[in-house]
Amino acid sequence: MDFAFDITLKNRALFKMFLENLTLDQLNTVPKGFKNNIFWNIAHTVATQQLLVYKLSGVPMLLEDVFVDKYRKGTKTEHNATQNEVDEVKELLFSTIEKTQEDYANKFFKTYNEYTVSTKSTLTTTEEAIAFNNFHEGIHLGYILAQKKALGV
């Protein structure tokens, strides 16, 4: 699983770079043809990882429900993020994955509640959830790159 976590951390480093190098206005703008902004896409990946790995394993998530409910699948950009929210997500990008690595190494995840994702793949283990999460985050990296292009940055 070290390789899977390494991929996640490298992708999260790209997300952090967007949060640090784009203006708050750029992060908050929903480009024409999109439903969400760059900030939502990044926050969504943080929330989704917690749902896929922790919630479906039947253990408490590392995030508050209010955060997850704001950025989970099926939600859309409802407000402009503040700099404090950007800073919070920037920290969560790594703290959540580092804690997941620790919890996985300590065999914290004992069960998994089977879940069929939108690609029609069925996740049956925590390992499958971690692997699928990387695929999911890659999709959102693609959205972000397309949104940057649409914004002309």
Image: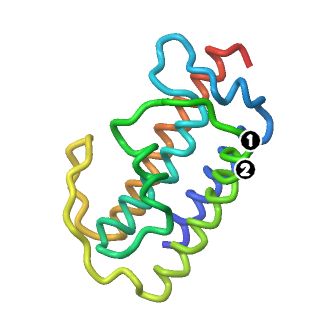
Q: Is residue 6 above or below residue 139?
A: below
Q: Which residue is mark 2?
A: 87
Q: Quadrant of residue 53?
A: bottom left
Q: Nearer the viewer, residue 51 or 8?
A: 51
Label 1: few (<14), some (14–19) or many (≥20) C-alpha neighbours in 10 Å: few
Q: Are marks 2 and 1 in contact (CB under 8 Å)?
A: yes
Q: Residue at x 35, y 76 (%)?
A: 59
Instruction: Return the x and y of residue 151 as percentages of the image width and height.
Output: 66, 15
- How many numbered discs sit on the rendered protein? 2
Horizontal arrangement in the rendering, residue 71 relative to residue 9 (left or right) = left
The quadrant of the picture occupied by the C terminus is top right
Label 2: few (<14), some (14–19) or many (≥20) C-alpha neighbours in 10 Å: few
Instruction: Return the x and y of residue 132 as percentages of the image width and height.
Output: 38, 54
Query: Distance between the Cα atoms at labels 2 and 1?
Result: 6 Å
Q: Quadrant of residue 152?
A: top right
Q: Which residue is mark 1?
A: 83
- Residue kind at label 2, given as amino acid type: Asp
Q: Residue at x 48, y 88 (%)?
A: 106
Callout 2 secondary element: helix
